[in-house]
Amino acid sequence: MTKGCDVAEREKQRMAILISGNGTNMVEIIKAQRRGDLRADVAVVISDNPDAPGLRRAVGFGCRTAVTPYTTGVTREVNERAILEAIEQADADWIVLAGFMRILSGDFVRRFPGRIVNIHPSLLPAFPGAHAIRDAFEARASYTGVTIHIVDELVDHGPIIAQEEVPILRNDTLEALETRIHAVEHRLYPQTLQALLCLDF
Ligand code: GAR
């Protein structure tokens, strides 16, 4: 597929970004791509949540979008069909989870071995789950952080490709901690994606 790390010389990789909420990480990825700091195309932004603020942001950037709401009473595999279709139509090479709050099925993960990336707001394996920042804060940990990893079939699990520690300060508030963690995420995710996609040859 790609020939080496001279990204200017090779065909660009295509990312499908999956979101469920605010999409602030997605915005930083799009901005990095537009600045030329991330040599990969945002092929499509997919949201399982029709009301996700990130979806409006993606439209504002002129990105192709797909809304793939989950319905209850059917399997994950059935719910994922629309996601797979959107990925296929956009011809994406990489699946970039940016605040996508659904657990992907084993079937889905096995279709894209080593090609699904996730960002999580803790130093995994500490504080997995949907409320990682709050959980670390309430546990009175002295530090937490950000992890970027390849997704495997377990939840918030898989080979770690980047981690950065964020201290929890003596007089911290949850809001202040969240702001500092998001600032690290917004810098680390585009940088790590650029490094990862550059190594992919
Ligand atoms: C981010 O903090 C991300 O790490 C977290 O959701 C937030 C999404 O923010 N993801 C998880 O907790 C995954 N387990 P954003 O929608 O503004 O990018």
Image (cartoon, helix red, strand yellow):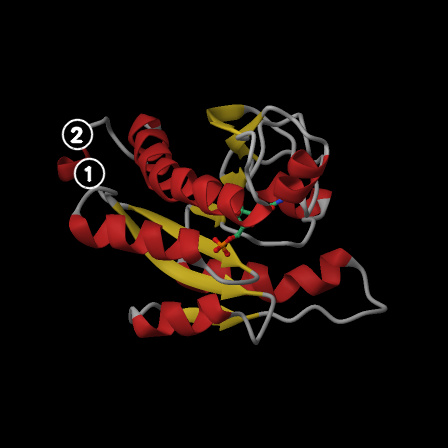
Q: Amino acid at mark 2?
A: Asp
Quick check: is the Cβ at mark 1 less than 8 Å away from ligand 1?
Answer: no
Identify which residue is drawn at 31% across, 35% down.
191
Say what secondary structure mark 1 lies in.
Answer: loop
Say what secondary structure mark 2 lies in.
Answer: loop
In the rendered image, residue 175, in percent from the top left (x then y), is placed at 54, 50
Q: Quadrant of the C terminus?
A: top left
Residue 128 appears in the figure: no
Density class for disc 2 (Cα within 10 Å; few <14, some 14-19, many ≥20) is few
Q: Amino acid at mark 1?
A: Arg
Identify which residue is drawn at 49% across, 45% down.
176
Residue 153, picture quadrant: top right
Please determine whether, in this image, residue 161 is positioned above or below residue 97: above
In the rendered image, residue 76, in percent from the top left (x then y), is placed at 75, 57
Q: Nearer the viewer, residue 126 or 141?
A: 141
In the rendered image, residue 129, in percent from the top left (x then y), is placed at 70, 42
Q: Nearer the viewer, residue 12 or 55?
A: 55
Looking at the image, do the residues carrying marks 1 and 2 touch, with CB atoms under 8 Å apart?
yes
Identify which residue is drawn at 60% across, 66% down.
48
Residue position for label 1:
10
Residue position for label 2:
6
Please determine whether, in this image, residue 100 is positioned above or below residue 21: above
Identify which residue is drawn at 50% across, 63% down.
46
Q: Quadrant of the N terminus?
A: top left
Residue 78 appears in the figure: yes
